[in-house]
Each structure stands twice: as structure tokens, then as C-alpha cells.
Amino acid sequence: MWLFVLFLMVPLIEIALFIQIGGLIGLWPTLGVVVLTAILGTWLVRSQGRQAIEKLRQSFGALNDPTEPLAHGAMILFSGALLLTPGFFTDAVGFALLVPGFRSLVFRELQKRITVSSVVAGQAQWTSDDRRSAQSDIIEGEFEVDETPRQGPSGWRRH
């Protein structure tokens, strides 16, 4: 239900802001501001996106939890979509999501509401009450070690 209200209210807010700002500064300056915010937003999203990718690489390299860099990257991507959408309200929310402190606040609030289950070294760590036994994840099988010399650069052999 809240999603329906969101899809209904955002366009109404945008229309109201266009009417108010357009009446205050005129048509062409209003359109100029919309185009300028899209250009500025695109530039900011690209630069912050590069930084987010670098932080994600560092997180993977140090074997740290990548949840926060991934969330920041997703919020930067979402802010880019908002900034490319014509409107003053969506631009305000998009620019707010480009502020690292605001993103951290949103991340902490989302973290309180979302339960994350992660996989570490092939063993699942369940945080919900729905814990399964370890035996249900075991797959039995047989294998043979093929010690014939490899052929070709990839190690694949032709039969």
C-alpha cells in the first residue's frame, strides 16, 4: 500500500513544484535548472560511483564484509536514476543520496530493518529462526584424480 501512495504522491509533488518554481522564475529558467541538475548529477554519480567501486575492491581485497560498500553503490546508482528523472523533489532526494553522511544514515536505518544471511567459506550462517541441519547441505560423490599430462594452454584435453 505504501508503494502505491509513493507512486501517487511523487508525481503530484513534482507537478506542484514545477508550477510553483515555474511561476516564480519562469519557464526557460525552470527547464534550464532541470537540465543543469541532470548534467551535474550525472557527473557526481560517475565520480562517486568510481569511489564506491574502489572501496568495494578494497573490501574484497582485505576480505572484509562488503555489505556497506555494496549498499553505498546501490544508493549512488539509485540517486543517478533520481537525478536523471526531471523534477525538483527527485533531484533533492538524488543529491541527498550523494552525500556520504546521508548514505551512512540510510544504511544504518536499513540495517536495523533487514536481516542478512551470509555465506562464508561455503558454510551458511543463518540469522533467522529457520535453521537447517548441516547434513542437508552434504552432497556425496566419488572422484578420480586424472594425472595425465595436460595438453594445450588451458589444460583441457581433446578426446
Image (cartoon, helix red, strand yellow):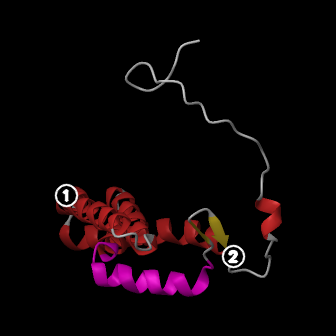
Image: 112 above or below 57:
below
* Residue 94, position as x, y percentages in the image: 34, 69
Where residue 144 sits in the image (x, y, percent)? Answer: 67, 36
Residue linked to disc 2: 126
Q: Is residue 60 left or right of residue 51?
A: right
Q: Which residues are magenta?
A: 96-115
Residue drawn at point x = 20 percent, y = 65 percent: 26
Residue shown at 53%/72% (left/top)? Answer: 9
Would residue 75 be counted in the magenta stretch? no
**Relative height, residue 41 to residue 148 (above, below):** below
In-front residue for pair 133/16? 133
Coordinates of residue 61 in the picture (x, y in percent): 33, 64
Q: Give the class, few, some or many, for how many residues have Cα within 10 Å of label 1's Cα (few <14, many ≥20).
A: few
Position of 80 compared to 131: left or right?
left
Give the structural element (helix, strand or loop) at label 1. Answer: helix
CA distance for labels 1 and 2: 40 Å
Q: Residue at x 24, y 65 (%)?
A: 51
Taken as a whole, is the magenta stretch helix, strand or loop?
helix
Q: Nearer the viewer, residue 136 or 144?
A: 144
Q: Amino acid type of disc 2? A: Trp
For this rendering, which residue is in front, 15 or 149?
149
State the SS at label 2: loop
User: Which amino acid type is marked by label 1?
Assistant: Trp
Whichever of callouts 1 and 2 sits on the residue coming sooner in the sequence is 1
Where does label 1 land, which residue?
Answer: 43
User: In the shown orientation, is residue 126 left or right of residue 101?
Assistant: right
